[in-house]
Amino acid sequence: AQSVTQPDARVTVSEGASLQLRCKYSSSGTPYLFWYVQYPRQGLQLLLKYYSGDPVVQGVNGFEAEFSKSNSSFHLRKASVHWSDSAVYFCVLSSTGGNNKLTFGQGTVLSVIP
Amino acid sequence: DMKVTQMPRYLIKRMGENVLLECGQDMSHETMYWYRQDPGLGLQLIYISYDVDSNSEGDIPKGYRVSRKKREHFSLILDSAKTNQTSVYFCASSLGGGLYAEQFFGPGTRLTVL
């Protein structure tokens, strides 16, 4: 069995501030982790992904995430947010123990205020 | 232009009516998916299709069926819709169905069952 928990349903930050969105996962096999973003009235788009190697992965639009096996975490970060980053962010898990299916976190709604 | 399209975007039906949601992709992806998104639950996999006439149940298949007669089209059918099937439905496709295959999502169909 596998699961993903995003403990923060909503996060509000000021424009220009730094950001961290938290993600914890549970997996019986080797985890493959993704962050997807959903802008209003749109489908999900891939931000970044981690398979192996360097635990810090870079994504689009200045986002990065850090994988920690010891903490079972895959937190998303950005040094300076822009109002256009306001969206819903999903942490997603695929693993060798998950029958090739994706498991989605509940999502974190990010609001960037001017 | 890599794209996943969904029709219709909005649909209102009465309980007991049949519903057909259509999805198309222009990337020749073998694997296609249907998800539903409910508040606070992330995305839940309804069905996955590995190619024409090769479909498998996802995590919540009850009350749904699918059809894939061409690689580029994947339909979701609700026979006798129920009010608890009110949701936003997303179609996605990927090149292969491997553990780390990026999924491309359509814009979603918002279905209301009265």
Image: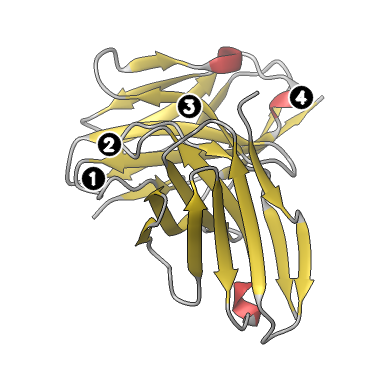
Tag 3 or tag 1, which sits nearer the N-term? 1
Disc 1 and disc 3 in contact, CB within 8 angstroms: no
Return the x and y of residue A50 as percentages of the image width and height.
Answer: 34, 24
The three-letter code of the residue at mark 4 reads Trp
Q: Residues within 10 Å of mark 3 (few under 14, many from 20)?
A: many
Q: Nearer the viewer, mark 1 or mark 3?
A: 1
Chain designation of label 3: A
Q: Residues within 10 Å of mark 4 (few under 14, many from 20)?
A: some
Return the x and y of residue A41 as percentages of the image width and height.
Answer: 74, 44
Q: Nearer the viewer, residue A43 or B71?
A: B71
The three-letter code of the residue at mark 1 reads Ser
In the picture of the structure, the residue carrying the numbered disc 4 is: A83
The three-letter code of the residue at mark 3 reads Leu
**What residue is at 38 percent from the left and 58 percent from the top?**
B55
CA distance for labels 1 and 4 = 34 Å
In the picture of the structure, the residue carrying the numbered disc 3 is: A76
Disc 2 and disc 1 in contact, CB within 8 angstroms: yes
Tag 4 or tag 2, which sits nearer the N-term? 2
Q: Which disc number belongs to residue A27?
A: 1
Q: Secondary structure at mark 2?
A: loop
**Left or right of A114, for residue B31:** left
Return the x and y of residue A30 as percentages of the image width and height.
Answer: 19, 35
